[in-house]
Image (spheres, rainbow, N blue to C red):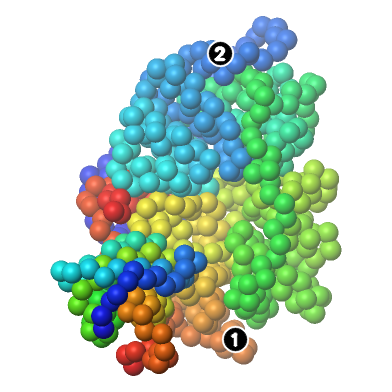
Amino acid sequence: MLLKQPAIAGTLESSDVQVTITPQDGGVKVEVDSTVKAQYGRHIEECVRETLGNLNIDNALVKVVDQGALECTIKARVECAAFRSAQVEDNYPWGGAIK
Amino acid sequence: MKNAVNREIPDELLVNGREVFQGSNYRDGIRYQKAAPKVRMRTSQLDSKVLPSIVDAIKAVEFKDGMTVSFHHHFRNGDYIVNMVMEEIVKMGFKDITIAASSLGTSHDPIAEYIEQGIVTGIQTSGIRGKMGEVVSFGKLKTPAILRSHGGRVRAIEQGEVHIDVAFIGAPTSDCYGNASGKGGKSDCGVLAYADVDAKYADNVVVITDTLVDFPNFPASIEAVDVDYVVVVDEIGDASKIASAAARFSRDPRDLLMAEYCAKVIEATPYFKQGFSFQTGAGGPSLAANRYLEPILRKHNITMSWICGGISAPAVDLLNKGLCECIVDTQDFDTVGVASVHTNPKHFEISTSQYASPSNKSAFVNKLDYVILAALEIDVDFNVNVITGSDGVLRGAPGGHPDTAAGAKCCIIVTPLLRGRMATVCDSVVTVTTPGECVDILVTDYGIAVNPKRPDLLEALQKTKLPLTTIEELRDIAYSIVGAPDPLPFKDRVVAILEARDGTILDVVREIEPLK
């Protein structure tokens, strides 16, 4: 998937995560800010990278502001931000791009 | 050396008679010599003990470097006393100060700076939160903080492990001799239970009030015979933060479900009979349990003999409806509690020693039937953590948790299985504040687990339709949803000691890096 513009998905509500994706060369860079970073920071970064990998995104800057979201939420927000960034506007894979 | 809750306690802490925790009743029945204050006698006539300012009081008690000062926390987050007194002590250039408070909160953030400056070098408290919790966790305090339960603090003072040089006691009302009360004035907090031991065991006692009343201010919680000086200031606290408006019952369906489980657990267990005694913590589901208890009490035509502890509207409601014979009160959380202890002759003030100390000849908690308490975390050994957050930083208080859990015949912990991404039921709590041997039943929104040490309670609950499970199953459900957490990156240095009620070491908290 080709990212075209900066895009954002999610909120700063409790148990949600706000994901900002910016097209960027030189691989995937993930910045995590989380209320549960000490115990789940590694899990969050892995989840973001795995989701991007499944969408075939190899270059991006991803900023994650997490308020204790579950992995299903993180995955959904990353996918949504990616589709918005790639300007995909129809035929969304509802239920998640990767089953 | 490993202790009875399987925590490694560094040998260098085990000096001067300090031992590791060896079970809740390890020191039951020992005899000890009580500590005593060094008192200045007065034979001469005296019209008044009022001094013009806090500075004058600090001078009058001949304050020195290295002294230990004490405070109570009846003003909760509305307290002005700690900051006011410490500011003057620091301005006067004193150093190496230990603060021995019954608890400290987020209103005491300025103390964090005195810790970083190396002026405050010791903290002994129940609660530690906000900036102070952070600087202590990040290793800025010169000596490890000592964290105790409310009863444990009284014990440490009675047994002379904490010697208070000067107690500064904020009082809503006082007369010119220091007869002080929690009732009346601008900063009404209802009772002064926590300060009782300070007044009786500190070498110097200074009462600070914003409402000077006629002599004698009777009945007095703090008696003039124990008070050296009285200082009158403009304001001792922010009344709106001292006693909040009565909290509405939680409407969160998850809280209500757990509250209903708690009430049904009580109904089904053998101590539920005419005249049982009861305490709840101040958390949402704990308080909501009161509401579900009422119909059950009526159904069985049972009344309680007494409710103890921190008091708020639900307990007062049960008293006023005649479902409880009396309240014995150590702290008031809301205006309803404050008003009731003023007016209801069946609502009594007791000292923290009477409430929870393990070093007197038996406290109220030793006669408790049920207590319902919350937890930040509980592990598969039923050990509870209420002090360290999921980032390893100090942000809580043992309070009366370990005391009531140890004393009550049936201790019920109520907590949602998950808080955001945090699993509350886990393999091993970050810090043990209440040992698992004191915890009998865990109520969560995903089911109820009974401590295997209590087959009698399990048998009683098996006769109900309550959703019974095991604590291991609850942990597995939690981890299946949020994932197993990574261990926290603690360093070696001990920044806080969690003392068990009896003075043995239950756990230690180690230094942690601030998260980047």
Instruction: Determine crowd level at label 2: few under 14, some 14-19, many 20+ residues with C-alpha closer than 10 A.
Output: some
| Residue occupying image coordinates x 73% and y 10% | B47
The chain carrying label 2 is B
For label 1, the residue is: B466
For label 2, the residue is: B56
Q: Position of residue B256 (x, y in %)?
A: 65, 74
Instruction: Label 1: state its secondary structure.
Output: loop
Instruction: Label 2: state its secondary structure.
Output: helix
Residue A39 vertical placement versus B121 (above, below): below
**Type of the residue with mark 1:** Leu
Residue A32 vertical placement versus B246 (above, below): below
Q: Position of residue B91 (x, y in %)?
A: 44, 19
The chain carrying label 1 is B
| Residue occupying image coordinates x 66% and y 67% | B250
| Residue occupying image coordinates x 43% and y 22% | B90
Q: Nearer the viewer, residue B269 or A41?
A: A41
**Nearer the viewer's eye, disc 2 or disc 1?**
2
| Residue occupying image coordinates x 64% and y 35% | B237
Residue B47 vertical placement versus B324 (above, below): above
**Type of the residue with mark 2:** Asp
Left/right of residue B495 with respect to residue B260 in the rendered view: left
Q: Position of residue A9 (x, y in %)?
A: 42, 73
Residue sitting at the far top? B44
Which label sits on residue B386? Answer: none
Q: Which of B22 and B335 is in front in this view?
A: B335
- Location of residue B210 by image quarter: top right
Q: Position of residue B18 (x, y in %)?
A: 32, 45
First in sequence: mark 2 vs mark 1: 2
Residue B223 in view here: no
- Location of residue B240 by image quarter: top right
